Image (spheres, grey):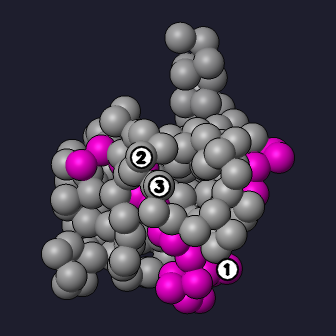
């Protein structure tokens, strides 16, 4: 419980302290960065949305649950799940081609990314900030092949970090 509570407390402290001196949007950004810092392992590579200019260079894997993926996802993403993840889900992938994993904020995708690396995938990157950061930076997301503004934010508490797009829970 302490491990889960700590990131939220850090984020809340950063948000409140930043709010007094900055606009709310900036404060959320600072708090969100603080939250992500507590979630990510420093030795697992991340790519920020602005570092991804062409998704086709990656095998893009969505590590959220099926109902989240159904709302929206990155263009060309393959759903592999988290709770239901199995190496069978990625058996057809090329272990030498770069892989970009993502979820809502990057915690679940980092865990799946570690499993991929252990299984011999050479280049695995976690999308920094997940689908929320991607949407906040006005990068396109899709539903059944068409652009959408809907973003499944996992829960209302995670939804506070979405500044651009329509929140779906």
User: In this view, which residue lies farthest toward the top?
Assistant: 1
Q: Is residue 104 visible?
A: no
User: Going by the image, does 68 lie left or right of 52?
Assistant: left
Residue 66: image x %, image y %? 24, 49
Residue 134: image x %, image y %? 48, 70
Quarter assignment of residue 46:
bottom right
Numbered-mark total = 3
Q: Are marks 1 and 2 in contact (CB under 8 Å)?
A: no
Alpha-carbon neighbours of circle 3 within 10 Å: few (<14), some, or many (≥20)? few
**Is 64 contained in the magenta span?**
yes
- Above or below: residue 55 compared with residue 12: below
Give the residue drawn at x 20%, y 61%. Answer: 71
Q: Which residues are magenta?
A: 42-66
**Is 51 contained in the magenta span?**
yes
- Find disc 3 in the rendering and name its residue: 91
Mark toward the viewer: 1 or 2: 2
Quarter assignment of residue 85:
top left
- Find disc 1 in the rendering and name its residue: 51
The image's mark for residue 129 is none
In this view, the residue in front, 59 or 34, is 59
User: Going by the image, does 133 lie left or right of 78?
Assistant: right
Q: Is residue 101 visible?
A: yes
Give the residue drawn at x 62%, y 57%. Answer: 126
- Above or below: residue 156 compared with residue 52: above
Mark 3: secondary structure: loop
Q: Are marks 3 and 2 in contact (CB under 8 Å)?
A: yes
Give the residue drawn at x 21%, y 82%. Answer: 145
């Amino acid at each position: 419980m302490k491990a889960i509570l700590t990131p939220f407390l850090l984020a809340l402290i950063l948000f409140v302290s930043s709010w007094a001196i900055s606009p709310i949007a900036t404060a959320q950004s600072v708090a969100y960065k603080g939250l992500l810092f507590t979630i990510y392992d420093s030795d697992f590579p991340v790519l920020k949305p602005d570092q991804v200019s062409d998704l086709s260079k990656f095998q893009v894997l969505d590590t959220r649950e099926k109902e989240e993926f159904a709302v929206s996802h990155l263009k060309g993403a393959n759903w592999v799940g988290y709770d239901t993840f199995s190496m069978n889900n990625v058996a057809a992938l090329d272990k030498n081609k770069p892989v970009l994993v993502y979820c809502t904020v990057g915690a679940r995708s980092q865990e799946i990314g570690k499993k991929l690396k252990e299984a011999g995938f050479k280049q695995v990157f976690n999308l920094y900030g997940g689908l929320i950061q991607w949407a906040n930076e006005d990068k396109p997301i899709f539903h059944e092949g068409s652009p959408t503004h809907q973003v499944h934010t996992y829960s209302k508490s995670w939804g506070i970090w979405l500044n651009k797009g329509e929140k779906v829970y």
